Amino acid sequence: MMKLRDGIFILLVMHMEQILVLCMSGVIQSSSLLNLEIIGKDASFYHGCSSNRKCKCSNITGGILADCSALNLTKSPYFEEKVVSVNLSSNLFTYFPEEGYLPKKLKYLDLAKNKISKFSKGEVTPFSTPCNIVSLNLSSNFLSLDIETYYKGVFQNLKYLQYLDVSNNSNEDKDYYCPDQVFQELSSLQSLLIDGVKNVTFDKGFSTLSNLTFLTITGIVAKGIITKEYFNNFPNLEYLDISATTEWRTFYNFSLFTFETGALQKLTKLQYLDISYHRRLHMCGFRNVTYDLPYTSIRILKANYLECERSVSTVLFVDDIKPLNSTELEELYLDGNNLEETDLDVPQYLPKSLKYFSARDNRWVVSKYAYYYIPGLTGIKTVDLSFQNEHQMSHSENSWYCTEHHRETSHCICDRLPINANENVFHWIHDKEVSYFTNNRRSGPLITACIPYTNSNFEFVLVPPNIETIIIEKAKIGDNIPPVYFSSSSVKKILLQNNQLYSLTGPICNLTQLQYLDLSNNRAADITSYVFGSLIGLKHLRIDNNLLGYSNIFHDNSSASIFENQTNLMFLNMSSNRISTLFQNFLYMTSKLKTVLLDHNLLTDWNISIHHMEYLMFIDISWNQILYLSGDGMNLLEKAFHLNITIDMAHNPFECSCDSMIFLKWLAMHRQYFKGFGNYSCIYLRKSINIFEANLHLKKDCYSYVGVIVSVTIGIIVFLGTICSMIIYRYRWKLRYWYYILKGEYGIDHDKTDGNFQFDAFVSYSEHDRWFPKDYMIDFLEKQKGLRLCIHHRDFIAGSAVAENITNAIHNSRKFVCILTNSFLESKWCMYEFNIALEDIVVSRQGKNSIIIVQLLRTDIRNIPREMRYIMNDDTYLDYPENEEDRIIFWESFERDLKF
């Protein structure tokens, strides 16, 4: 026994370290689990407002919003105490979150689009902890309207609940029951969204909900009939929506086809009613509804799409809307009811309080009967007649089922016919005449101004006297805006986009208060300079998506007259018009413009002056055909840079070439003014590159190219200059000779010597040697021998150039005498005379030497020019002797040589 104990002790000692490690590990794990348990119920989380890291937290008024939607959760996470709003929609909950998970201060809870079929798990009463909830959304779950789901006491803790949405829950084809005593517990309830499916009635328990003013009933199509007692227990309702906009059931099995008269008479506080999208209710059901409305406080009535899409056209009769004349109705919506005809007197019975009238998506043809009592509609501010005659039919299964009941529409028309009407209702309406209105086109003189106004020259448009907005979008209005005169100048906004106005002629008169005009998407290919002439208050103009570039007015400067009266214009959209040219003064009068949109056109340059637009903020010339801007275009835009404007030139086919280099540099230099400049590009060597890269490449390419051109050009010029200089230098004396020969009249009428020479000899000497010809040559050769010498200081013609005198004198002298001395060689004029004499030998004397050199004094042979040495070597020259005896022989030889 002792040995066994000792062995165990030794074993424990040997493995003590491992045991301690295991023990510590267990402690740590236990501590970790405990810590998780504490953190799970703590009021703060290190990673947000919830124990689930994926929940998004954001601050809202009064606390924190925890968004845990669409996380595929099956169990609620814990939340921080400061959380007042929890979004758990679009998850996989099958029951309401258990107690302890939701924060105590919770006010807003969204559990829509889950799989919740019960309010609680077990027998625990829900909403015990979060008892301050004011908004609860449980729509699109499986909470059936029956006593098992809505058991007594389920809402007893929601004393402060104001908004409850339990719609779209009772989706099965079975009988349901609404336990009114359960909803009676919601004493503070103001808004209720609930299913009004088969067999569901709202009994007396709802009458105790004195604060309930907002009611939306979904699934009401399953009832088929609205009885006159249906709403009796909602005496305080102000808002009632029973539309089938989001109806999920098939039309074949479920349709609301009857609305009994009297169903709304007890809703005296009712201000808003929507009965739209009950396509088997027809206009008969609409008439039953209008009969009850004088008992209410109705302000807004929506009765849209009460006819089948593929059904026959229908008619609006006086009796359909006559009860409305006894109400204070402000807004009436009759969209999508296949209305094609209207009783002539219908406008007369619309209430004067009516401000907004919408009859979109019908089949009305605007004609003469439509205007009869319009002047009496003094309250109308807005009319929307868009999407007429669209004839776009749905391909849904419901639309086909609905068509099977088209006979109901015909019966409904017949049932509503006035007693004194013809059998054919359409002829009955068309036979009515309006004496003061005609739609016939008038022919007459061209109208370009609104003054003077004569009724026979204009199309007269009758509108309610105080109307401000007219919306007729995509209603197939066409094909021209003629000279038109509106009956009221109160209109401020007109939307005529997506029609068929192929020409904008005008003028549009008596709309001096019009501020917003939309004529976009009309395919208009022509516009006049006076169409907007009288719209002096216009601020916002859209004429985009037309074909105005084809109009002749944009081919000359008369286009500047289009906006000459729009001095208040702030927004102009002319995009997508195939405009290729705009002149500089096109927007000269629109100095208040803030936005100019000219994108998706065919502009190749910017030509418009904008420097005077002190409020200008944005210009869009993207998607045009601009390769590069000209110098004038860049200058016009640059003048507006001080306005801190933004320009969009994206998606233009910018050219990467030396021609565009200046523009691309300018673009980069002012890039802060160009929207999305980083995405601007051009094609370089079949590759798209950004503007900075383009500038780098072009700087290199165009610099080298220009350098080569300049270098080659300079080289050629230098080469040609050198050649010319060499030629001129080589033949300088000949050129000079001919110049002065041709310039001077060398056939001067002087006395000629033998051989037709004026002089026997031209004497060339320096001023230093002037004594020799003056004192000796004149005396011996002229006085004694009768020869005639040309002595320049004596015989040159006064007033003529020296060079000209020299050339003419040498040319008209038989011989050229050169008095050679050192002074002669140093004299430029002497050397000039010698060279002219050499040229004269070649040109005029057929190479025969006529130069006589007289060496007056000894000269250095090295200083004698080469040509002179040739003459001295080949021909005899004369040395002037020093002694008197030899001089006699010298003069005789000199005389002989001159006469030879």
Image (spheres, rainbow, N blue to C red):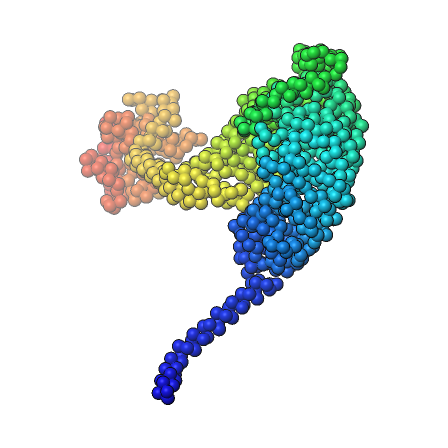
Q: State the residue at coordinates (74%, 33%).
A: 229
Q: Nearer the viewer, residue 191 or 656?
A: 191
Work out which residue is located at the far front of the displayed protein and give it. Answer: 1
Q: Quadrant of residue 779?
A: top left
Q: Quadrant of the C terminus?
A: top left
Q: Quadrant of the N terminus?
A: bottom left
Work out which residue is located at the far left of the displayed protein and give it. Answer: 874
Q: Quadrant of residue 165?
A: top right
Q: Position of residue 136 (x, y in %)?
A: 65, 48
Q: Nearer the viewer, residue 148 or 720?
A: 148
Work out which residue is located at the far bottom of the displayed protein and give it. Answer: 2
**Residue 570 appears anywhere in the view:** no
Q: State the residue at coordinates (63%, 46%).
A: 149
Viewed as shown, does residue 467 lie left or right of 727?
A: right
Q: State the residue at coordinates (55%, 39%).
A: 647
**Residue 719 appears anywhere in the view:** yes
Q: Position of residue 447 (x, y in %)?
A: 68, 16
Q: Is residue 81 above or below residue 728?
A: below
Q: Quadrant of residue 717?
A: top left
Viewed as shown, does residue 186 lie left or right of 852?
A: right
The number of numbered discs placed on residues in the rendered structure image is 0
Q: State the residue at coordinates (53%, 55%).
A: 54
Q: Position of residue 814 (x, y in %)?
A: 29, 27
Viewed as shown, does residue 235 lie left or right of 307?
A: right
Q: Nearer the viewer, residue 44 or 1?
A: 1
Q: Position of residue 399 (x, y in %)?
A: 57, 26
